[in-house]
Image (cartoon, helix red, strand yellow):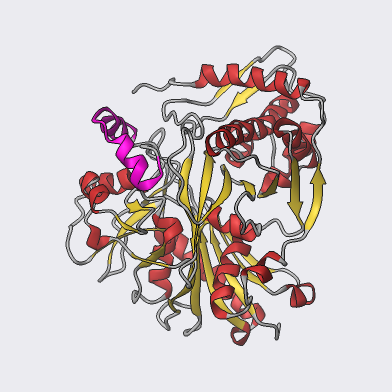
Amino acid sequence: MSTARCVIAIDAGTTGVRSRAIFPSADAAEAGVIASYREFTQHFPQPGWVEHDAVEIWEVVKETLAEVIHSVGVASVAAIGITNQRETVLAWNRHTGAPYGTAIVWQDRRTASRCDELVAAGSLPRVREVTGLVLDPYFSGSKVEWLLANRAIPVDDALAVGTIDSWLLWNLTGGDVHATDASNASRTMLFDIRSLRWSDEMCQLFNVPQRALPTVMPSSGRFGVTSERCGVPAGIPISGIAGDQQAALFGQACVQPGMAKNTYGTGSFILLNVGDTCPAPAEGMLTTVAWTLADGTVAYAVEGAIFVTGAAVQWLRDGLGIISSASEIGPLADSVDDSGGVCFVPAFTGLGSPWWDPYARGTIVGITRGTGRAQIARAVVEAMMYQTRDAVDAMTAAAGVEIADLRVDGGASAMDSMLQMQADQLGVTVRRPVDQETTALGAAYLAGLAEGVWPSLAAVAAEWVVEATFHPNPDRLIADLGHETWLRAVERSRDWATH
């Protein structure tokens, strides 16, 4: 049992929850990694629909959190930080604590036709201006509208609507606090990212009652404390919340404008810190709140959102049985020199940045009689870095800012060969840190900053240590030829599903 002061990060991802104790670097080596992980069920009731049981998520949060608290001792816990899958949204009853059905996951595409209607009605420019987002079913606003319209949910004072962070905060505080932070709020399409307030105009557009939404608080600051009713020790401050990709940006110590990161998770998300001034909307890109601090500091980011990277590895494992564990993908892909002409576009739920095509679908082209498991695995890995190049190319063109290097994390970042290919495709240096769980780190740093575990942003930045660096091949010809073939495959995947 540790006697050092730590912050516990709750990382509530798309497929599982990980709670982890994060110690300042002076104590981290002695403490080791103290963490607990549980997967939870994915529900696919119809093609293009993805749902989660919010009660199950809360149960696995309680289990993992309790295990970590037990390991470190409650007296060592300075605070809890929460980071979460963004855009996933649910509604629940404040009196009973019961959700009104399942949560609708960020990957869900059921509201694509509603977004099309709003585009046809001319709403897109105003949505872009106010929220920094595009009219796409990825975001929460149209999901909330669908929930309220299709589940006969009473719109009364008992109604609470929120993203997963607010659901967990509400439960941790025993129902005392219904709040979120600006990074999560900025992903709902209901939030004015300049005034940092819920938008009356957007709430009216999506028929969302504003009184049901959570209070928006700084990403780093005390939200509340754990309740004796929540199933873990009472009185622990909950002092940091951020959406997973913004948390990873903070965890990668990208605290200065011009710094960028990519997380290769279920999807991939490239964020570029653009400072404290909200930029104009950029074609194909998202503008989002990176974080807000208790002293009023605001950081904005330009984001490229890729819906499927690691999820394609899961599909190879669970859907096709090509691999038996995710860790096999790298060695299998490396067993061949190339994909044999095979291109895989993982548009399972449409394409994100820079295409924003909810009707694109997964495509494999270039198959021959000689195509085998290894070639398909290689094509899946190549799709990760091609999609990243598409997003970075659009981001740098729109923002007018060149990315000097790219800090990477997430499960697939363990593949050296993929990161070398990524550097070659981008023409920039790629750096992987020693601690690659940067989403959890970011949540912990935000909470620890609020509680004095880390005294300043400089102290947070000093925690980042590089583990591997990948320099690009100066000869771009091979990289560009491969990318041109990839773009041909993307065109064949687009606008495939019936509108």
Is 116 within the magenta? yes
Percent from the top left, x then y, of residue 22? 66, 71
Image quarter (top left, top right, bottom left or bottom right) of the N terminus: bottom right
Instruction: Specify whether 143 is left or right of 172.
Output: left
Q: Residue furthest top?
A: 369
Percent from the top left, x then y, of residue 99? 32, 60
Query: Residue at the location (78% across, 56% down)?
Result: 466
Instruction: Specify whether 318 is left or right of 359.
Output: right
| Badge count | 0
Is 6 within the magenta? no
Percent from the top left, x then y, of residue 56? 45, 60
Query: Residue at the location (53% across, 26% down)?
Result: 362
Percent from the top left, x then y, of residue 29? 79, 72
Is residue 315 positioned above or below 19 on the image?
above
Instruction: Specify whether 175 is left or right of 31.
Output: left
Residue range (magenta): 112-133
Image quarter (top left, top right, bottom left or bottom right) of the C terminus: top left
